[in-house]
Each structure stands twice: as C-alpha cells, then as structure tokens.
Image: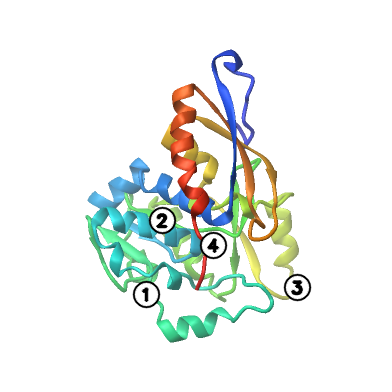
Amino acid sequence: MENGQLDLSAERGTSSLKQFALSPAAGKRLIAKGIATHPEVLAAATSATLVVVAGTTNGYIAEELLGALGVSESFDRQRFFRGVTLPPKARPAEPVQAARGFPGDVVIRRGQWLKGKTLFDVADELQRGDVILKGANALDLEHSRAAVLVAHPKGGTIGAALEAFIGRRVRLLLPVGLEKRVPGNLDVIAEYLNAPGAEGLRLLPVPGTVYTELDAIRQLTGATAMLVAAGGVCGAEGSVWLAVRGTGEQLEQAQQLLKPLLAEPVFAM
C-alpha cells in the first residue's frame, strides 16, 4: 500500500477477493483488535508506559487491552470521552459526563493500570519507548494523515501529546475509523477553520502513524484491503464497504475476524 492506495495488480492469479460491509461500531472494534496486538503497543504496555487518550474509538481499544490484563470489568467505555458529536435531538454529552464522572485516560505502566490518571498527569514523564494512542476527527486516507478538532484554548490532549512526541520521541499512534475520511488537503482545511475571523472548533493536522481498519486487517490476517464504497440507512449510516484480497487462508481468517463484528452494537451512552 502506498499513499493509502492499494495495488491490486500483484498476484491476481494466486489471490481471491471478498467484500465486507462494516458499521462504524464494527470498524472501531476491528481497529481495537488490531491495536491490541500491535508489537509497539504491547511492548509499551508491558515494559514502558502506554497512554490511551479518552475517545470513542480508543474506548474499544482500552477495553481490549484491559481485557488482556484481566481488569476490563472495571472499565466503562460509555464514559470514555471528553467530547462527542451527537445527533441534533440527542441529549448533550456534558450532563452524561457530570452524572457518571470522567474516568480519566487509560494509563498502563509496566502491565499495571494506573486508574484515574490522565495524559496530563504523566505527559512530562513520558520518554522514548512509551506510546500514546490519540484518536482523530479527520482522515486523509490518500496521504495517511489525520487531524484533530481542538476546543481547548491551550490545545488540550493533542497539545500534551505533541510535546512528548516532538520533545522526547514518544511514539504517537492515531487510531481513526474510515468514516472520518475527508477530501482535500488537511493543511488547507485547517487554515480555513483556524483563520482569525472564524468561529467554532479549530483543526490541527498532526504527525504520527495513522491506523485504520485497513491496517488492522493487514496486521491480523495478512490480507490487503481497500475502501470501495460507503453509506447505508436504518442504522448503517457511516458504514464502509471493504474489498479484501489475499490467499484462501488469509480470506478465511478475514471471514472469521470480520463476521462476528457485524453484530457489534451501535455506540450508546
């Protein structure tokens, strides 16, 4: 894969193709399963420090990682965010957070979950070998870049993450679902939103390694995947159609991986 584009011309005679439709929730679970087996993430969680910054996609990741540690039952994914986008008639997120309490980010240090800690508590201690997982709000799939919406006047969690990333070479991974793809140049979009006369949220294109459903499929099965269509109704809004190509064994693994995810319930608070 190069610049987000999959070369399907190679080995056409020895590979087959299957198509799968994934809802946003299924995509989040798929990303989580991939990240939970990522070598650098596992190394940080067991031998260094791993910070999973609160967010809806990262909630699925935290659930998978804490499950591996045997402590997932004390983790509530439904509270694991600082801000979300809701339908116009839905109840706002702030009262939900106030009623249930923000649990903090998930900080795992040498195999131990430091309950209640946030990125801000440990950011100054992070160093090379540590990993930060930070979600994103916009995805340029072609160039494998992501951007984050910013509401905090000092940059919020992405500001703290970038200090560690740039200043101390902490690894920054950006798990982001394909439903967040946007056309165009993220730098141009950011310039538009961040102009002095503009109102609303700001947008910050960030460095780091983007990780999508396509990366999870490759990591977990060895097959390659391409986004080929999108959309749906009656609860399938935001769904993506993926074409997965590989050997018979790889496609069987993809089938076993993706079929159970089709039953993943929609995110609820």
First in sequence: mark 2 or mark 3?
2
| Label annotation for residue 266 | 4
| Label annotation for residue 103 | 1
The three-letter amino acid code for the residue at tag 3 is Ala
The three-letter amino acid code for the residue at tag 4 is Val
Q: Is residue 188 above or below residue 9?
A: below
First in sequence: mark 3 or mark 1?
1
- Looking at the rendered structure, the secondary structure element under dot 3 is loop
- Looking at the rendered structure, the secondary structure element under dot 1 is loop
Residue 111 location in percent, x, y? 22, 56
Q: Is residue 194 left or right of residue 35?
A: right
Mark 3 and mark 1: Cα distance apart in space: 33 Å
- Assess whether mark 2 and mark 4 are in contact (beta carbons under 8 angstroms): no
First in sequence: mark 4 or mark 3?
3
- Residue at 49 percent of width and 43 percent of height: 259
Q: Can you see residue 79?
A: yes
| Label annotation for residue 61 | 2
Residue nearest the observer in this picture, 236 or 159: 236
- Looking at the rendered structure, the secondary structure element under dot 2 is helix
Closer to the observer: label 4 or label 1? 4
Residue 95 location in percent, x, y? 51, 85
- Looking at the rendered structure, the secondary structure element under dot 4 is loop
What residue would you read off at disc 3? 198
What crowding class fits label 3: few (fewer than 14 Cα within 10 Å), some (14-19), or many (20 or more)?
Answer: few
- Assess whether mark 3 and mark 4 are in contact (beta carbons under 8 angstroms): no
Residue 45 location in percent, x, y? 28, 52
Q: Is residue 202 above or below residue 169?
A: below
Closer to the observer: label 3 or label 1? 1
First in sequence: mark 2 or mark 1?
2
Specify the quadrant of the image occupied by residue 224: top right
